[in-house]
Image: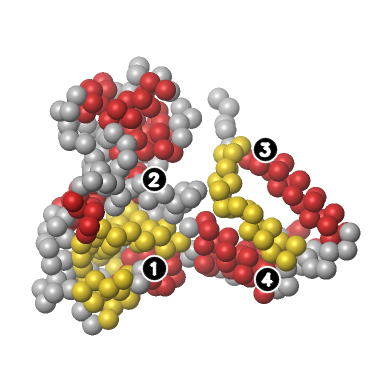
Amino acid sequence: MDADKLMNGVLRQHPRGRDVAEIMAAALAAVEPRAAVRRVLRKDGHTVVAGGQSYELSAGGRVFVIGAGKACAPMAEAALEALGDVVYAGVVIVKDGHLGAAGESIGPIKLFEAAHPVPDERGIAAAARLAALLKEATTDDLVLALVSGGGSALLTLPSPGLTLEDIQALTAVLLRCGATINDINALRKHCTRLGGGGIASLASPARTVALIISDVVGSPLETIASGPTAPDPTTYADAWRVVERYELGDQLPANVIEHLRRGRAGEVAESPKASDAIWSQVHNYIVADNRTAAEAAIAAGRERGFDAVLLTTFLEGEAREVGRVAAAIGCEMRARVAAGGSSPLLCVLGGETTVTLGGG
């Protein structure tokens, strides 16, 4: 990221404004998708090295590249650059407008656009192609899963008995009811097939290596993009409790209600759990997240003479309330400098705030 593009009127007038812009640019560069993948992925002969671990390919072993998320086009480009001709095929799904310069294919990797956050027919068709490709993988193969924010909607493949319209209605209800991301995921993972460990399950018996860019505070694997390569700690009973907690029973399609009933009755298989055998063949790596950006900002600040401290990467709450806290911290910093502090101060706070919209 070019620091010049981050300069605004306030920064131009401040004596350290250029430094601040360069610090922000360093934070953004640290989480740039292509760079994040290239830092952790390379090929050494017939061995794929990811996250510092080696995954040897047999003579007939192939690498399948699959992915979903808003950042996955540049991630896929980086994966092909790193692995070259060992990549056999791939399917990557991105949000509309996020293909970038890659177009609809990157070598053997096919890219598909789909709607987000409410899924559409294109998303389901692309998810079905992704699932079909995974079923080709064998014990000799390696599945490289690229995951980033937005993957939940882009990996929509309705559970048996549910339709696209059912999932669209469910998504719309969840987006407006004020549910937490964990509650949303509990329901979503039990109404679709690829979240909640579904990718890892379909890829078995092949080995799965997931490179993940997190947009979730704390980067819990089961939450990012609904955890397609992570065990699901929630159950159908948990999903039903979300329906009750937010009084959604009369707002959801009858098919969804019936599907959840059957799940609670044990008539529908649960999502993959931590005790399942498949997880010995699955390895997840967070390649960039909020902390990555925050730590890069701290390093850049110290290089420029700031007394820099990372206060938190778990900042959450209503934006107007968090803003008041941030302003109070700023006042304290200014008072310290005015009292004779020897170095300019830099405090970095990371997280995700919420803006609650009124009706209408």
Q: Which residue is mark 1?
A: 37
Q: Which residue is mark 2?
A: 223
Looking at the rendered structure, the kind of residue marked 4 is Arg
User: Of residues 66 and 141, which is closer to you in this image?
Assistant: 141
Looking at the rendered structure, the kind of residue marked 2 is Thr
Q: Name the outermost residue toward the front.
A: 275
Q: Which residue is mark 3?
A: 321
Q: Which residue is mark 4?
A: 302
- Determine whether the residue tagged by mark 3 lies in a helix, strand or loop: helix
Question: In this image, 281 relative to 152: left or right?
Answer: left
Label 3: few (<14), some (14–19) or many (≥20) C-alpha neighbours in 10 Å:
few
Location of residue 187 by image quarter: top left
Marks 4 and 1, Cα distance to the nearest angstrom? 26 Å
Query: Residue at 57% of width from left, 31% of height from top?
Result: 357
Q: Are marks 1 and 3 in contact (CB under 8 Å)?
A: no
Label 1: few (<14), some (14–19) or many (≥20) C-alpha neighbours in 10 Å:
many
Q: Position of residue 1 (x, y in %)?
A: 56, 68
Q: Nearer the viewer, mark 3 or mark 4?
A: 4
Marks 3 and 2, Cα distance to the nearest angstrom? 25 Å
Query: Residue at 13% of width from left, 67% of height from top?
Result: 140
Colour mapping: secondary structure
Say whether residue 164 is visible.
Answer: no
